[in-house]
Image: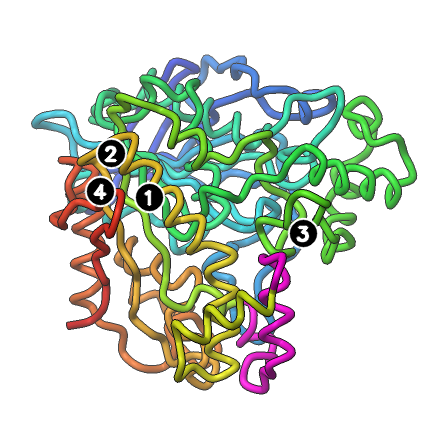
Amino acid sequence: MAPRGLTTITTTTSGPIRGRRHEHGTVFLGVPYAAPPVGHRRFTAPMPHPGWSEVRDATQPGPTAPQPVRDAFGTLDMSPYFGPGWQRGDDYLTLNVWAPPPGGPARAVMVFVHGGGFVAGSNRVPLYDGMSFARDGVVLVTVNYRLGIPGFLHLPDAPDNRGFLDVLAALRWVQDNIARFGGDPGNVTLFGQSAGAIIVGGILADPASSGLLRRVIIQSGTGTGAFTPEQAGIVTTEVGRKLDIEPTAKALAGLPEERLVAVLPRLAGLDLRTPTHHDPLGGITSFSLVGERQPAAIVAAARDSAIDLLIGSNLDEGSLYLAPLGILADSTETDVRETAARFHSDPDDAVRAYRAQHPFATAAGLRTIILGDGLFKAGTQQMAAAHASATPGRTYCYEFAWRSDAIDGQLGASHVMELPFVFDHLSLPSLRGPRRLLGSAEPPAGLATRIHRAWITFAETGNPGWRIHQPAGGYIEHLRAT
């Protein structure tokens, strides 16, 4: 039992929980928002938690979704991003709540969805410690959701996008409970990064999210990252082949989690191109949302939405997938063309267009640009334009441009780089060093203060303090050290 005076008890709709006080408020860890996804429930929509009557301890981190070990990209230490990996336990559909001290008006609520390629990550990540948000007057919620085969494999006898449905269930929990933590259920901002950002974009496009949120932040995601059912079916067939079973929810429910996790690395490199569609995520993962239409197209067709959007990407998104693997510095023109072929039906024409835009870029620089555009930037721009057109006056765009000196200066403003600034965690020791995200040079604390404050101001007011992004020729806020 925790020492007296250091804990606090709050009652949720499922039962009472004991959290821990800290200097900026309270934190509740591992709070269930849905029933444990075990047995056949691994492949159903999330179900209500049965609840509890005794006070449940929420002072220690809870279990995480089953996932393979993934703590590095090549030589780059990514443990602060991926966290401790699979921490076993059935009750992993949980969230963490970081709340400011009680008193005063209800606070803005921010709900964060982690990335990890739809197969890894959790809310137990050092980067996602929410004390800085509680310090600055916001209630922060970080969410676990199903990953990999239970979360996103397309199956004939199960609903698609089950991990996505988990996040919707977490948002419903927030509506029912967040006032008990000092939060305003009428002012909820959903934000996410990478795979989490793709999920957030899908929720923005889904009518089922009506009434659950007021604002959305999409960090290095894409509005065009969903697989068609045909593409997702390629993954399904391969899972069945590698596991030597009929790829159905009924058959998979009889397998232990260990087998479902062990097969994930063996799915890398699947060719998801079809006669009518390229792979929207360029082969970096075999899982994504599944749908007949892209979220950006759905958002473009919507009208009279009351949802504010802050959206952006990083200057050197593609470098994360090249520099740590030692394949960036020696890039050739052949590498540039092969990268373009991942996203363009006529790669030679695409390379010529990029050369015209970036006449002084090296092969390494052009390869990074083409990969980053294909994975994140182009789809980000489409989502921004769609929202700005359908919902005028509510769209704000950014580009994060501070460059790390990690990996001999090759990493730059890569994918993931903005997260320590958003969470105001530049001082984490695990982020510093030549093979760590922020590199060896001192990162600009003033930029972290500015970005962290912009995210909070947007959550509180709907305006981060920037000019509005218009549908044509829109304004982009460049986030760099000054």
- Residue that numbered label 4 is attached to: 134
The crowding category of the residue bearing disc 3, from other C-alpha atoms within 10 Å (few below 14, some 14 to 19, many at least 20), is some
Label ID, residue 464:
none
Q: Give the residue displayed 50% in from the left and 37% down from the top.
A: 144
* Residue matched to label 1: 384
Q: Which residue is mark 3?
A: 68
C-beta proximity under 8 Å, tags 3 and 2: no
Provide the residue span drawn in magenta: 321-346
Please report whichever mark, 1 or 4, sits nearer to the chain's N-terminal start: 4
Name the image quarter holding the C terminus.
Answer: bottom left
Upstream in sequence: badge 2 or badge 4: 4
Q: Amino acid at mark 3?
A: Pro
Kindly identify which residue carries mark 2. 308
- Looking at the picture, tell me which residue is in the foreground, 176 or 284: 284
Asked whether residue 332 is drawn in magenta, I would say: yes
Q: Position of residue 97 (x, y in %)?
A: 34, 35
Q: Marks 3/2: CA distance?
A: 36 Å
SS at mark 3? loop
Disc 3 vs disc 2: which is toward the camera? 2
Q: Is residue 327 visible?
A: yes
